[in-house]
Image (cartoon, helix red, strand yellow):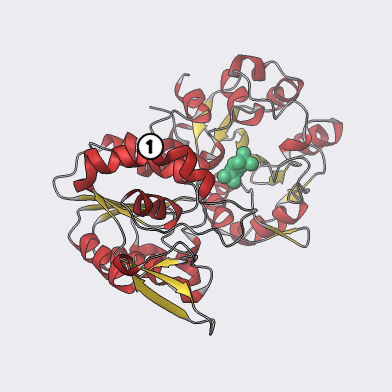
Amino acid sequence: TFDTLDDLASDQRVLVRLDLNSPIEGGEPQDNRRFERHAKTVRELAEAGHRVVLLAHQGRPGRDDFVSLSGHAEILASHVGRDVEFVADTYGGEAIDAIDALDAGEILLLENTRMCDDELPEEEPETKAETEFVQSLAPHFDAYVNDAYSAAHRSHASLVGFPLVLPSYAGRVMETEYEANTAIAGKEFDGRVTMVVGGTKATDVIDVMNNLGTKVDDFLLGGIAGELFLRAAGHPVGFDLDPEADLYDSQWEQNHEVVEEMLDERGDQITLATDLAYEDDADERAEIDVEAIEEKDVSFLDVGTDTAEGYADVVRESEAVFVKGALGVFEDERFSVGTVTVLEAIAETDCFSVVGGGDTSRAIEMYGMDEADFGHVSIAGGAYIRALTGQPLAGVEALKRE
Ligand code: 3PG
């Protein structure tokens, strides 16, 4: 489908797009899996003696997380085990001077791509290839490597412009993410295929369920979508603790018809929680059977223990398990039971597994599980959802069309 680093000639000047978009606290990027993963691609290129120049973005203009990449260079260097020079310029004179001064095996990170006007508007690759951004940088390189699978759903200059003007390759992260995240749509499994769907965006869950309807035997539901399905099944759940946030009612308005229809037509594929957990007056975790819920006046924060164990049993009988979104508010240990029980069951079995979707994968290190016990832990959020819903990713398509 696309060329990889195995196809790269030696002694190249390589421009590499990474996705180092990270949580920012106090203006500083926080270390996370993305650094560790991309460090492998960067190290491989530097050790092979290429001159390695890195492009990445951070945050969105106007938001607090829209900061310089200087802190990212330090974190990346600690993972690569080599110096990563940083220049506070993306394609101006300073950047070009620093690029041209590089020696074999050296690594340079350029400034946040989203600080350049050319980067952001979503446009066709042909348009992006003609931007000053792409035209200024391209002549200084022999090859372009896209390793930023998790940003590849954006048709931005640094992601889709370069493949039209430089020989292009998929980086190691791009390769592994692509393979794992398209497996559910493309691969045939003999045994049971299970998908755990949760999180806060019901429309994502519904789209994934619609797209993968014929590929998945069991959908195990939790999170906001789980409560919308329970409401459609006649249970008074989905209470907005903060009416301003309006998590349930607006999502119910938007989606209840399709949710009701799905329950009607494909109910046997859909497993809903039989008990739920909430915070009681003493601030403790309390649980209630779904059948016993009489009024919509409690905010549920996790699936109950029986549900979690039932879901774990299904996982143990599955040949493949895909996770999209958490089953509860796992950041609070009291409400981590559903998410952690299911993840531990996946880790214990040798099924084919992919875990992704927003922050779900963060639960793995938070609760001391070993990433090596999972088939693939995706570092993609939006791109993972797009892949599961069968949409092509602009950055991947751009690599393929060479
Ligand atoms: C991500 O963090 O999921 C990607 O880097 C994409 O970021 P974006 O949603 O701001 O485009």
Quarter of the figure with residue 56: top right
| Image vertical order of residue 223 relative to residue 146, above or below | below
| Image vertical order of residue 202 relative to residue 367, above or below | above
The residue under label 1 is: 257
Quarter of the figure with residue 25: bottom right
Badge 1 residue CB within 8 Å of ligand 1: no
Taking the view exactly as shown, the residue that stands out farthest to the bottom is 282
| Image vertical order of residue 204 relative to residue 91, above or below | below
Q: Residue at x 50, y 62 (%)?
A: 362
Residue 34 picture location, percent across and down: 56, 53
SS for dot 1: helix
| Disc 1 packing (10 Å; few <14; some 14–19; many ≥20) | few
| Residue closest to the eye, 94 or 255 | 255
Residue 326 picture location, percent across and down: 44, 59
Query: Ligand 1 appears in which quadrant?
Result: top right
Q: Residue at x 30, y 37 (%)?
A: 261
Q: Say left or right for 120 vs 235.
A: right
Amino acid type of disc 1?
Answer: Glu
Q: Residue at x 49, y 82 (%)?
A: 284
Can see residue 18? Answer: no
Residue 270 picture location, percent across and down: 26, 49
